[in-house]
Amino acid sequence: MTSKDRIQKALNHQEPDRIPYDLAGTTVTAITRNAYKNAMKHRGLSPDTGDDEIDPIQQIVTPHEENLLLLKSDTRRIGAHRIPDYKNIKRVSGNVITVTDFYHSDWIFEEGKDLYFHMISSPLAKYESLSGSMHLLTPPNWEEYIKNLRSTLDSQISKVGNFCGIADRNTAGLTENSLRIRGYENWFMDTLIDPAGVEALLERITEDKIRYWDAVIDWALETGNEHKIQVIAECDDLGSQSATIIAPSQLQQLVIPRLKIIFNHVKKRLPHVKVFMHSCGAIREILPDLIDAGLDILNPVQFTAAGMDLKALKHDFGDVLTFWGGGVDTQSTLNKGNPQQVADEVKKIIDILAPGGGFVFAPVHNIQDDVSPENFWAMWDTLQDYGKY
C-alpha cells in the first residue's frame, strides 16, 4: 500500500495496513532543528535537513528525504515558506537576527539564547482605532509573491510521488494574524468596542487567504499536479487550555463563517481534497460549527485541554472527522516523561483513535527542543510495533 493510499483509507474512515504517520507534512506536525539533530545522531543517522527555510520562526526543519523515507513518513509538504527568501532578507546584527513577516510584524531571534523567534512589533498596534487604521496595512506585492510561490512549488512537487501531498498555508490563521497585526490586548478590546474594525481586518485576511489558495490551485491545474494534492492545511488557534479564545458565539459570528468561505472555495476548485485545520486548545463546543464549515481533519487534537477527551471526541465525531495528531502529549509525556511512559501513552491513544480508521499519527503539535532522543524513538518505535491493523 502506498502512502497516498494509506492516508486516503484513513480519510475515508477505513483501516489501512498500518496507522499513517506524518512528520513534516505541515508546519504544525514537524520537529525543531535541535530535537531532530539530536534524535538522528542518537541512532547514527545523518542529521542533515532538507529545506531549512520552511518556518524559521518556529525553528522547525524538514528532514532530508533519505531520513523521511527511513522514518516512514507518509506525507510531503508543498506550499509557501513562512518567510520567503529568508536567507536574503533576514537582518543580522552580531548574534541577533530580525525578520519581517507577511503582514509586516517584526520578529527577533538571539542565537545562543532563544529557542524560537518572538514578535517585537505589530503594524497597527500604535493606532487608537482599528477601523481608522485599516487603510495603513500595507498590501503584499502579489505579483512578485505569486511568482516566487510558483517557483517554490515547482521545486517541491517532485518529492510528493506516491506520498500524501499536503498543500500547506502561507500564514497564520484569521484570529492569529489579527492579533499579530493589531497587537494582542488591542485586538481583544476591539472585539468589544470596534467590532466593525475587527470584521474589516478578518475580511482582509480572508481575501488574502483565498488569493493564496487560488495561486496554489492555479499552479496545480496548469501543471497537471492537482491530484498530487490530497489535503489542504489551514490553521487558527481558537482555543486556550481551558476555553475558546473569545466566546463561542463571537467565533460563530466573526470567524467560522469566513473559514467556511475559504474551505468551500478550495473544495469547489479541487473537489477531491480534504480540509485539514490546526486549532489548539479547548474547542469541543465549536467542532459542530467547524464541521458545518467544511472541516474534514482536526489537528493537533489537544486532549489535555478542557472538554477534549479522546474517547468522547472519537465517539461523537469519529464518523466525520479524521483525527490527525493527538498521538502523544507534547506538554508533558513526550518532553518530561520517560521512554516507557511515552510508549504506554502512544499505545493507549492508538487503542482509542485507530479503530475504524480516521486517524493519522502525529504528536500534539511540533516536536520541541526539550524532547529527548530516547523519547522520540520510544514514540516512533511504539508506532511501528503497535500501529498495525
Image: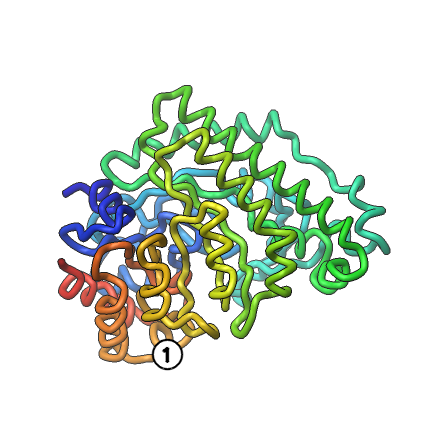
Q: Residue 150's spot in the image, x, y percent?
A: 47, 27
Name, please, the residue furthest toward the top.
Answer: 222
Q: Quadrant of residue 377?
A: bottom left
Above or below residue 81? Residue 45 is below
Closer to us: 159 or 323: 323
Q: Quadrant of residue 152?
A: top left
Closer to us: 367 or 177: 177
**Where does the N terminus fall, quadrant-wise?**
top left
Q: Is residue 180 left or right of residue 230?
A: right
Q: Residue 252's spot in the image, x, y percent?
A: 60, 55
**Residue designated by label 1:** 336
The answer, for residue 384, to whether it is visible in the render is yes
Task: Name the residue rendered at 36%, 59% in the picture.
Answer: 317
Q: Is residue 66 left or right of residue 169?
A: left
Q: Secondary structure at mark 1?
A: helix
Q: Residue 374's spot in the image, x, y percent?
A: 26, 72
Task: Name the residue rendered at 25%, 70% in the picture.
Answer: 346
Closer to us: 356 or 49: 356
